[in-house]
Image (spheres, helix red, strand yellow):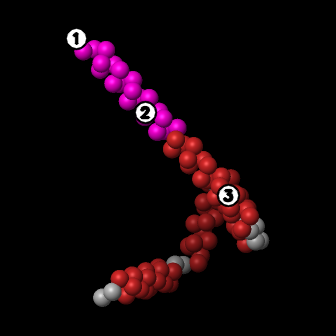
Amino acid sequence: MTEGEVEATRERDAGEKADDALGRLDATEVTRAVSAFARENPHVALAAAAGLGFLLGGGLTPRVLSRLGALATRSYVKGTFAQAVGTFFDEQARSQGQLGSSP
């Protein structure tokens, strides 16, 4: 079996599993669960509704997506860099402490 055939088989199996799971869902049970979640977490429910409305309303234009991507990338790089610098200084402090304690 080629790699493409294996991937196609996996995708078909995943699709069948998703269809089976969706077929077993009860609409009233789902509605009840969503309603209960919204009552317990109203702020999250409002944020999700606003986000879904934004997406369905066509709010994700290529310009908005590129800006969101740039923001996420900048935030990730900043956090990673800060962690790397912190680790570097911690290791330097440890090595200085080990050098100072040698007789």
Q: Amino acid at mark 2?
A: Phe
To which residue does mark 1 refer? 103
Measuring from the top left, give residue 49's x and y in whole percent: 70, 63
State which tag comes first along the sequence, 3 or 2.
Answer: 3
To which residue does mark 3 refer? 68
| 69 relative to 22, above or below | above
Q: CA distance from mark 1 to mark 3?
A: 55 Å
Crowding at label 1, few (<14), some or many (≥20) Cα neighbours within 10 Å?
Answer: few
Q: Nearer the viewer, residue 81 or 49?
A: 81
Q: CA distance from mark 2 to mark 1?
A: 25 Å
| 18 relative to 30, above or below | below
Camera sees residue 88: yes
Q: Amino acid at mark 3?
A: Leu
Measuring from the top left, give residue 37's x and y in whole percent: 60, 60
Residues in magenta, as a range: 82-102
Measuring from the top left, give residue 45's x and y in whole percent: 67, 59
Tell me the quadrant of the picture where the N terminus can be found. bottom left
Crowding at label 3, few (<14), some or many (≥20) Cα neighbours within 10 Å?
Answer: few
Crowding at label 2, few (<14), some or many (≥20) Cα neighbours within 10 Å?
Answer: few
To which residue does mark 2 refer? 88
Question: Number of labelled discs?
Answer: 3
Residue at position x 67%, y 57% in the image: 68
Residue at position x 47%, y 80% in the image: 18
| 3 relative to 34, above or below | below
Mark 3 vs mark 2: in front = 2
Residue at position x 30%, y 18% in the image: 99
Q: Secondary structure at mark 2?
A: helix
Residue situated furthest left in the rendering: 103
Does the magenta portion include 88?
yes
State which tag comes first along the sequence, 2 or 1.
Answer: 2
**Relative to 103, is 5 on the left or the right?**
right
